[in-house]
Image (cartoon, grey):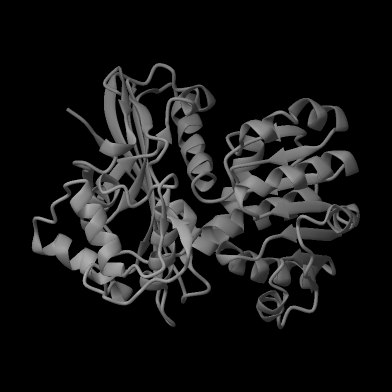
């Protein structure tokens, strides 16, 4: 068997190790393609079954040539590039796995995927991915017992572990930094106590809710994109509350609210950074949009990023979002030995045999270091496990799916538990 992986960025490190172990044990091969060949060769060192390929994803002939040799394809490319790979996989009759949200382009291939008898699984990472699988397993178990679910809240976040938390934002980057800058831009819609709630971008980080995770402590959360679209997928049309959120430490949300208000995350505003200092960049936006840093904590956060830094930027023209991303990649970089943290919590309220219950299911995963991060574990492992299960004919579905069907989530969750990625569940009766 030959597995082909496109992309070897931050989220790929643990997947690479897993596939290296599996392929060696099963006498399979795996080719990993990434334009940064030197970095890739370091990552696969020590795994004789893994091969590095430095192709450029834009090169259609090379891309197709590699896909032709595959028994299954995994794409960890930026979301906007999946479609090229997906089109090739349809044309060349290859199954495909990705960790990204299914977008309109991928969905447009559904009839062609069905006609070709292929299996494409999207949203097969952490969030989306493990969240779908773990939630659906509980939903099906409650329903099979005859229970009725009234409320579902799903929370997930990539955080910094307490022992590596040494900056005033209480955050470091363990995944795509672009997604951090754009977080919340689509606003959010969800259902609460029977009412549809629509939150615009400007309000996403205002007055974030809080909850307690026993292993971690108190965390803040903000609503994540379009929760409503998942109600029919989860078959929870009768639930009065349905919301999916992102977890952060509370001080992050307080600071990021100011970042949004000052329009420092804008892709539309283009500035000339030549001769512009970091101090002027931040202060001009804060002043222009009348954003006050009215606490010592807020001042410390923005000073940490450069509010008092007189150094000149000198990077030519760029959007404020691009410049902010550059700053964050430097200031929020994981240092050698740093450990990140993945926290997920599902909160259910349901009725069974005329008694109301609250069920909490939580997952806490800690990274090993700045490379083998908890984020890489929880994004990469579901993809690797699913690929192996498909190649071993233990998942025999066809069509375009996300992992909300039992044929996918049951075997994948069982294998994740063997790898130490397992949930703790508590149930209590409600008055």
- Give residue 266's position: percent from left, percent from top: 39, 47
Judging depth in this view, the residue of 355 and 84 nearest the camera is 84
Instruction: State which quadrant residue 30 falls in.
Output: bottom right
Answer yes or no: is residue 420 visible: no
* Left or right position of 220 against 176: left
Q: Is residue 347 left or right of residue 63?
A: left
Residue sitting at x 80%, y 59%: 3
The foreground one among 362 and 273 is: 273
Whether residue 408 sits left or right of residue 31 in the image: it is left
Q: Nearer the viewer, residue 201 or 91?
A: 201
Q: Quadrant of the C terminus?
A: top left
Whole-percent x, y for residue 42 in the image = 67, 81
How many circles with numbers are drawn on the protein?
0
Q: Residue at x 39, y 39 (%)?
A: 224
User: Going 47% across and 57% down the picture, which residue do you hit?
Assistant: 318
Q: Which quadrant would the N terminus be assigned to in this image?
A: bottom right
Percent from the top left, x then y, of residue 88?
Answer: 83, 44
The residue under the point 30% across, 62% down is 281
Q: Is residue 13 visible?
A: yes
Which of the 4 quarters of the picture holds residue 115?
Answer: top right
Residue 368, compared with residue 111, is above or below; it is below
Q: Is residue 358 left or right of residue 400?
A: left
Q: Is residue 347 above or below residue 145?
A: below
x and y, in percent, of residue 331 in the image: 36, 71
């Amino acid at each position: 068997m030959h597995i082909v992986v496109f992309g070897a960025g931050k989220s790929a490190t643990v997947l690479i190790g897993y596939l290296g172990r599996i392929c060696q044990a099963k006498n399979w091969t795996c080719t990993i393609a990434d334009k940064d060949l030197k970095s890739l060769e370091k990552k696969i060192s020590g795994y004789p079954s893994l091969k590095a390929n430095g192709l450029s994803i834009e090169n259609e002939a090379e891309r197709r040539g590699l896909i032709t040799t595959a028994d299954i394809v995994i794409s960890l490319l930026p979301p906007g590039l999946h479609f090229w790979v997906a089109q090739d996989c349809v044309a060349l009759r290859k199954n495909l796995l990705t960790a990204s949200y299914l977008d309109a382009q991928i969905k447009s291939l559904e009839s062609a995927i069905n006609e070709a008898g292929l299996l494409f699984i999207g949203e097969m990472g952490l969030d989306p991915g493990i969240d779908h699988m773990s939630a659906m397993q509980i939903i099906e178990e409650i329903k099979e017992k005859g229970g009725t679910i009234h409320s579902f809240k799903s929370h997930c976040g990539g955080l910094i572990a307490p022992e590596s938390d040494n900056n005033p934002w209480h955050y470091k980057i363990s995944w795509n930094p672009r997604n951090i800058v754009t977080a919340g831009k689509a606003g959010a819609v969800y259902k609460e106590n029977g009412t549809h709630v629509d939150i615009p971008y400007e309000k996403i980080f205002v007055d974030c809710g809080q909850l307690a995770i026993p292993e971690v402590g108190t965390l803040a959360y903000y609503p994540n994109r379009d929760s409503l679209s998942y109600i029919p997928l989860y078959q929870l049309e009768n639930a009065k509350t349905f919301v999916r959120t992102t977890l952060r430490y509370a001080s992050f949300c307080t600071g990021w609210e100011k970042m949004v208000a000052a329009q420092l995350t804008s892709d539309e505003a283009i500035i000339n950074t030549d001769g512009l200092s970091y101090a002027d960049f931040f202060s001009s936006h804060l002043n222009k949009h009348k954003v006050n840093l009215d606490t010592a904590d807020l001042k410390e956060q923005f000073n940490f990023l450069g509010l008092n830094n007189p150094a000149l930027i000198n990077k030519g023209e760029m959007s404020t979002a691009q410049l902010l991303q550059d700053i964050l990649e430097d200031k929020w970089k994981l240092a050698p030995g740093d450990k990140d943290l993945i926290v997920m919590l599902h909160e259910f309220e349901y009725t069974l045999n005329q008694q109301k219950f609250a069920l909490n299911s939580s997952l806490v995963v800690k990274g090993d270091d700045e490379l083998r991060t908890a984020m890489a574990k929880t994004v990469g492992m579901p993809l690797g496990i699913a690929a192996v299960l498909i190649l071993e004919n233990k998942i025999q579905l066809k069509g375009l799916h996300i992992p909300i069907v039992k044929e996918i989530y049951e075997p994948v969750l069982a294998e994740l538990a063997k790898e130490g990625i397992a949930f703790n569940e508590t149930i209590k009766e409600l008055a």
